Amino acid sequence: EPEVTQTPSHQVTQMGQEVILRCVPISNHLYFYWYRQILGQKVEFLVSFYNNEISEKSEIFDDQFSVERPDGSNFTLKIRSTKLEDSAMYFCASSEWQGTEAFFGQGTRLTVV
Amino acid sequence: QQQVKQSPQSLIVQKGGISIINCAYENTAFDYFPWYQQFPGKGPALLIAIRPDVSEKKEGRFTISFNKSAKQFSLHIMDSQPGDSATYFCAASGDTGRRALTFGSGTRLQVQP
């Protein structure tokens, strides 16, 4: 069964450092998403990406965040200068179309120290 | 208006019992209502979803009931099993406004043997 894969599973970084989280969406899907989940809290939308550009973003997705599809398979989330409050589980998801089933990866646990 | 309110926060059910989780929304532009199941350390997994043209959808032991006029929907888990113990999230998305999934706050279900 096709699945969304994310790497690394756990990333520890120092405050102020840049991190890149990687995702391989399901191959025939057109929409890609990043969500985050602070420990014990709900899943929050960050950004959606379609046709090589951002289609929607939330208030959380400020100038320190960026997304990119560097090649035909990878989808990345970059956090430029990490803060302690960026510590969370980051989930990549993909869907065939907007408003259809979104499939989530296993997540990257980001710990900022 | 983007919020999806979910209750209860936690639920304990005996094996074989019925688990009921409720969600309410405000945004009438929402037209897709999935439920996700999440085990500790894993990504959310789509369980079942409904669109507002039907009032109920059943898949195995899982049923979504949808009340468009009340702007509420609920998940019923029949014959609950210890393996159903997980956190359940309702979500919603629509064609206008926020098109990505907006998640509820989650319900931690514990099914006791």
Image (spheres, rainbow, N blue to C red):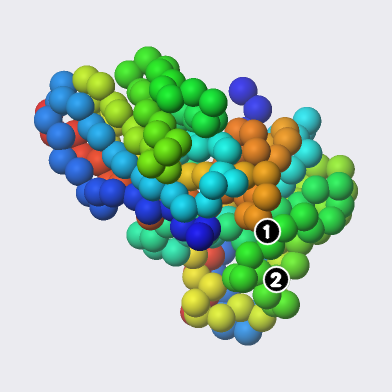
Separation (CA) of disc 1 from disc 2: 10 Å
The image quarter containing residue A4 is top right
Between A9 and B21, the one lying in front of the other is B21
Between B26 and A66, the one lying in front of the other is B26
Q: Which residue is mark 2?
A: A65
**Residue displayed at 23% across by 32% down:** B19
Disc tally is 2
Q: Which chain does the numbered disc 2 sit on? A: A
**Residue displayed at 25% across by 48% down:** B8
**Residue B39, numbered circle:** none
Mark 1: which amino acid?
Val
**Residue A47, numbered circle:** 1
Residue B111, relative to residue A31: is it above or below? above
- Residue A55: x percent and y percent? 77, 55
Q: Indicate which label's residue lies in the foreground, 1 or 2.
A: 1
- Residue A15: x percent and y percent? 57, 83
Confirm or deny contact between disc 1 and disc 2 (CB under 8 A). yes
Horizontal side, residue B111 vs residue B34: left or right: left
Mark 2: which amino acid?
Phe
For the N terminus of chain A, give its image quadrant.
top right
Q: Judging from the image, what secondary structure is the residue with disc 1 in?
A: strand
**Residue displayed at 25% across by 34% down:** B20
